[in-house]
Image (cartoon, coloured by chain):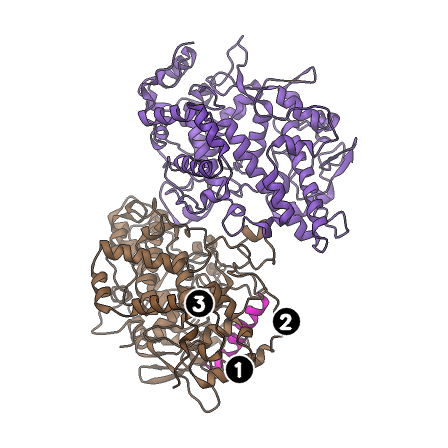
Chain colours: A purple, B brown
Amino acid sequence: MAERDKSGDGFENKLEGWLLTNIQPLWEFLNRTKWLGDRVNKFIINRAVLKAKPRPHQFSALADYTSWSSLIDRSWSGRHLPARDIAGLLNSNKVLTLFQIPAGGSQRMSKKSTFLFASFAQWFTDGFLLTDPECRRKNYSNHQIDLSPLYGLTGDVTGQLRLKSNEQGAKGRLKSVMRNGEEYAHTLFIPGTHDKKPNFSAVPAPLNMNKPVPLPSGQSDTIFAFGGDRANTTPVTSALNTLFLREHNRVAGIIEKANPSWNDERIFETARNVMIVLLIKRVVEEYINHISPYWFKFRANPSVAWNTSWNKSNWIAIEFNLLYRWHGFVPEIFSFNGNDVPVSKFILDNSLLSGNGLALLFDQASRQKAGELGLFNTAQRLHLVEQRSIEQGRDNQLASYNDYREAMKFPRVTRFEQINGDPQTVQGLKNVYGDVDKIEFFVGLFAEESRQRSAVPSLIGRMVALDAFSQALTNPLLSKNVYNETTFSAEGLKIIESTKSLREIVERNVPRQSKFLASFDQA
Amino acid sequence: MAERDKSGDGFENKLEGWLLTNIQPLWEFLNRTKWLGDRVNKFIINRAVLKAKPRPHQFSALADYTSWSSLIDRSWSGRHLPARDIAGLLNSNKVLTLFQIPAGGSQRMSKKSTFLFASFAQWFTDGFLLTDPECRRKNYSNHQIDLSPLYGLTGDVTGQLRLKSNEQGAKGRLKSVMRNGEEYAHTLFIPGTHDKKPNFSAVPAPLNMNKPVPLPSGQSDTIFAFGGDRANTTPVTSALNTLFLREHNRVAGIIEKANPSWNDERIFETARNVMIVLLIKRVVEEYINHISPYWFKFRANPSVAWNTSWNKSNWIAIEFNLLYRWHGFVPEIFSFNGNDVPVSKFILDNSLLSGNGLALLFDQASRQKAGELGLFNTAQRLHLVEQRSIEQGRDNQLASYNDYREAMKFPRVTRFEQINGDPQTVQGLKNVYGDVDKIEFFVGLFAEESRQRSAVPSLIGRMVALDAFSQALTNPLLSKNVYNETTFSAEGLKIIESTKSLREIVERNVPRQSKFLASFDQA
């Protein structure tokens, strides 16, 4: 493979990148220290977030000028850069060819990430990246990491998912059923129909379950009553949601036992406080550290954001929403327990999960490689979604790839070869755009070459870090006067502080297993 | 009058107070400097805000434990201190006697503040201190200084108040009518009825206009179609709202002239951006500086809050709502143009304004002294409101006066005489509470002695400063990437930066006058 032309990377970026991906013994040493490591953690996170201007941004997707509504109404997506004139772009159909696996070719697989990682990304971000299907400049997000795939976006959904009982041993729990000795959410529909069970009337049906054709009833019978309208997307996202359901009920039990006088409401709310922070910690310490190519391991230390200039109200930006379209990660085939399951058989079909249990799902998703992010690598089943993403960038009149490089402190590229060393990618971009300055944001993000030891290319990496840290660490549960034993209970705080991996959470929520994997990194 | 016992004031507070209210030449010098004055401004504001813990607070009025809803759902009022057990308090009827002017006595008048100041406080804070009448732990506030008395709390109200025209000379304007050569809002009701005019169906009727008895139709005919349900409360609050309506339309005209290609929407929104910041600047530089006894004059420099740890989402606290019940300020008699108008004749009756024009209203409200804040000084007409305030403190289970002193870095008082030197106040408090530790927050606030050169007593002053600065200077329009010419237009920014007094705004919005006052300070 040809070498990429690195003349457009920028000296400061190269130096920073070199330092953080070399001198491994120094970073390993810092990873073992508390005081010094905490300071380095804060310093690197601050640098990452301040690569661009902090919120509030001057514009939202509402209009190309600033109004009180554009500063307040978060149903319009936020945006990092102002709208620009987008006349003269090729039809999105044509641009889509850049994502399709060429005839006779096969999908390139990631050298680093498992399908579990890809699924975690999907499940986790589906909690807050919620484009309004009626208007792609709007959203129906709560703009918070609030575990909405599990609890729902609104109180009425949460209410229907809760058990609501003041009996000892049942307080603060989410509704569930036992099947083959394991705990699951109830199914959503009356069997054989697309009618929701009456007590789940407010619980959302899966998004697009009738597009392009209605889900066959064999499949719809496997759909769970989950808080999020995308949590059922694959058996692996459903497994993650089921895991957090079990852990919620387990945590509620521990809190109830230690606080026998508390009522259902207080135990539920305290368990939810614990669960949200448990998720944020896994996101920073396991998920972001998997994405990052650095030797230094980030820490979800709540105090990092307390006194920063970037601890401002969350508001998901349209660019953050789009850069997370990691469709290339989805493998065309999920090799499950010796069987090849094609992607069309595991979308909106939970039978793999219900039939095999949680441990095997995590294990098999950890053994399956994710696809690689990049052009010419998206599974057929996701082409329509890919095309909609291109169009969403246009609906929002996003500035060009080069404009975003500049806004994120990368030099503008002047030659296609600075983006990727792969001749096919270079030729594809040349054919579609002719001029590097015309490359669209969405396409440019994925056209960049994969970096060694990183799960994602450079610009995505920088923008993910910036938005993730500035929205995760500003969660109100991590704030100075809230992150304490009163908020989580003594037992809850202990669970938060002692849990070190997703695998641990799986282990304590499945029947005793001999061996299974639950990992974002390939073995 | 007896001297107050100052042994409970605290050394640091005394020193800070002494420095800021003495060495006048030093402060006057700083007031004239730009660079040094800006730094001193930032330093003093930071000290003022950091007297208590910054947002997010651990609890809201929702529950006595922290939940996701208590951290997110701002329809529940915020709170500085947790709920406490409030058993054993005297009936609120009895406590109310502490506010009543004793039989045969007369109202004490402020030595500093005019009725215009009192009315500005009322009109301005009625934009965001909006207790839900159904549940006094809740509110219907937008939690922002957004000029909602003028524009309404929601888009549908704003829509009905706007002219919406793309004709030259009419773009971006609010609806208005000309009467006696002056511009006013339309009246709200079909004359002789309590039915809203159909095109104002979403515009709120005045709060409590049917309590205790329906407003006579002669009065209801004077009610204006204003965005806020409290903006019509007196002819002086109506005058302030009318002033801001005229200024909005004036500013829209200037912006339209300079930007002939802009449409109605953009001119309206840009004018509103200007108006909100114009208000915030008057609040900090004229209103807060009137309240403060300091020689140093605060500046509404937008950059003050950009990099602070307290620039966090606004959330109006119940304590802030209650400490603003400045009922004692309302004079029993408004001496208007030689006539004595009793309070009962100027509540929900705009005839003084419609009949006399804006300049005379401002002039007369500037010549009328406000009452003094303190016990035994509330006009009869407001006793019911006073009693509801006492009860609201109890509904919210507020901690005691002494607890709030401590939270705000004042020593706890141990003797009644440390609160006030006035024997009647001391005796009244002793009779009602017996023990200083039992004094309620609401009563303690107003029991404190007035300070020289300050419009309000100590604890109110400290808490007002803290909440006002931390909610005004965090307005998104003042933020780093928003406060610029793009947001306000060049002409709008010039209006913001060149306007130095409320009087100027009046002057440019009334027919040419020989002389009139518009002042918070008594002449």
The span from disc 2 to disc 3 (Cα, nearest Å) is 25 Å
Q: Quadrant of the N terminus of chain B?
A: bottom left
How many other residues sit within 10 Å of disc 2, few (<14), some (14-19) or many (≥20)? Answer: few
Residue that badge 3 annotates = B410
Callout 1, which amino acid?
Answer: Lys
Magenta residues, start to end: B379-396
> Pointer 2 and pointer 1: residues touching (CB < 8 Å)?
no
Depicted B391 relative to depicted B432: above or below: above
Residue that badge 1 annotates = B430
Q: Earlier in the sequence, mark 2 or mark 1?
A: 2
> Does A471 lie within the magenta span?
no
Q: Residue at x 56, y 49 (%)?
A: A484
- Label annotation for residue A168: none
> In the rendering, at what x and y percent does residue A328 appear?
52, 21
Do the residues indicated by labels 3 and 1 lie within the same chain of the protein? yes
Do the residues indicated by labels 2 and 3 lie within the same chain of the protein? yes
Residue that badge 2 annotates = B87
